Amino acid sequence: MAFNDIPKIEKYNFYVELAFRRAQKVSLKYPKRLIMKKFDIIKEELSKSLNRILLAYPNIDDLDPFYNKLFKSTLQYVPIKKALGSIVWADRKVSEFHKLYIRKIAFQKSDDKRRLNKIRIEFYGRINSCIKQIRKELELLEESRRIIRNFPTFKTNAKTVCLVGFPNVGKTTLLFKLTGSKADIKPYAFTTKGINVSYLNKIQILDTPGTLNRIDKMNAIEYTAYLAMEELADFLVYVFDPTESYPLNEQIKLYKRIKKYKKKTYVYVSKRDICDHFEKELSKFKPLNFDELEKLIINLNKD
C-alpha cells in the first residue's frame, strides 16, 4: 500500500477560501440565480474537498493485519476514527445549509439586492463556522498522515521470508548475497533503521532491524520488525554470528524466543569460514549453508 500517496490535509480555512473564491468567479444577470449558483458551487467544492480526504485516508479497519496493528500501535486510533467521522458530519451539514438557504433565496418575491446579500452573508458565515468546527480534527488527520506516509511498503499477499537476529550479525549482507540489493552497512548496532525489502524470484525478503532480547521494552523499529515476523512471514531465517560482541548464549536465548512465534524458523550462521570452532555448539540448530537457504527460498512459491 502506497501510504506516501495520501495528499496533504490542509487547514480548515484553505477549503473554505477555495470554495468562496470559485463562487466569486460566477457571473449571471439575475441576482437570485447568481446567488443560488454561488451556493451550489460552495457546496460542491466543499463536498469534493471533504470526500477527497475520506477517500484518500486509509480505511483503518480494512487494513491488512500487519498495517492495522502498526497503525494502532503508532497512532491515536479512536481520536482518528472520530476525526474521520467529523468530516462526514461537516459534509452533511454543508448540504443541509445549502438546501436551507437555497429555499430562502427561492422564496424571495423580489430581487432586492440588500435582502439577498444579507442571506448570502448569513450562509457564508454558517458554512465557515461549520468547517471551522472541525479544524482540530483536520490538524490531527494531517499529523497522522505525515506519520503514515513513512510506513514501510510491503506486499502483504506475497510469499515472505524475514531475516532476523541481533544487530550487526550479517542480515543485510545476507540479503545482498541473496538478491543483489545493497544497503548501507555500518559496523555498529541498529544499522538497519527500517526494514529493507528485496525480492528473489518474486519472494519478498525482509531484512529486519537487529532485535534485542527485550520483548517488553521494544522501540518502534523493533516492534515493526516483530509485526513483520508475526503477520507477514511464511518462515524466518535466524542469523547467528559467533564473532559478534553479543554472547552466543544471548543469541541462542533470542532464537528460542523467536521460535515461540510458531513460524517455521531456519538457522543461518554468518562468517562460518572464520569461526568453525563454534560449529559443534550450533550444529544442534541444523544450520543451512547459503546454497541450501537460497534453494529453500526459491522453492517457496512452489509450496
Image (cartoon, helix red, strand yellow):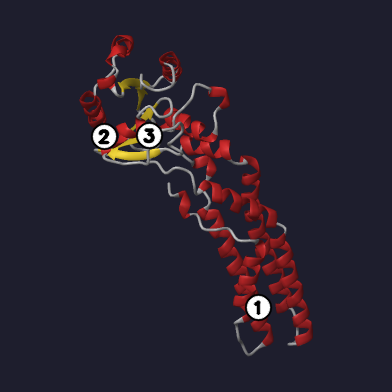
Residue that badge 1 annotates: 36
Q: Is residue 64 above or below residue 85?
A: above
- On the image, the x and y values in percent for residue 206 come to 37, 35
User: What mark, if any, has residue 177 been given in the picture?
Assistant: 2
Residue that badge 3 annotates: 207
- Indicate the secondary structure of the residue bearing disc 2: helix
Q: Amino acid at mark 1?
A: Met
Q: Earlier in the sequence, mark 1 or mark 2?
A: 1
- On the image, the x and y values in percent for residue 252 come to 41, 15
Q: Is residue 28 left or right of residue 242?
A: right
Residue 156 is at least partly visible in this image: no
- On the image, the x and y values in percent for residue 22 come to 59, 76
Q: Earlier in the sequence, mark 3 or mark 1?
A: 1
Quarter of the rendering containing residue 197: top left
Label 2 to label 3: alpha-carbon separation: 12 Å
Label 1 to label 2: alpha-carbon separation: 67 Å
Label 3 to label 1: alpha-carbon separation: 59 Å
Q: Counting other residues with Cα less than 10 Å from the Cα at mark 2, is it few (<14), some (14-19), or many (20 or more)?
A: few
Q: Amino acid at mark 3?
A: Asp
Q: Is residue 259 above or below residue 56?
A: above
Q: Is residue 107 left or right of residue 295?
A: right
Q: Earlier in the sequence, mark 2 or mark 3?
A: 2
Q: Residue at x 38, y 34 (%)?
A: 207
From the image, state whether disc 3 or disc 1 is nearer to you: 3
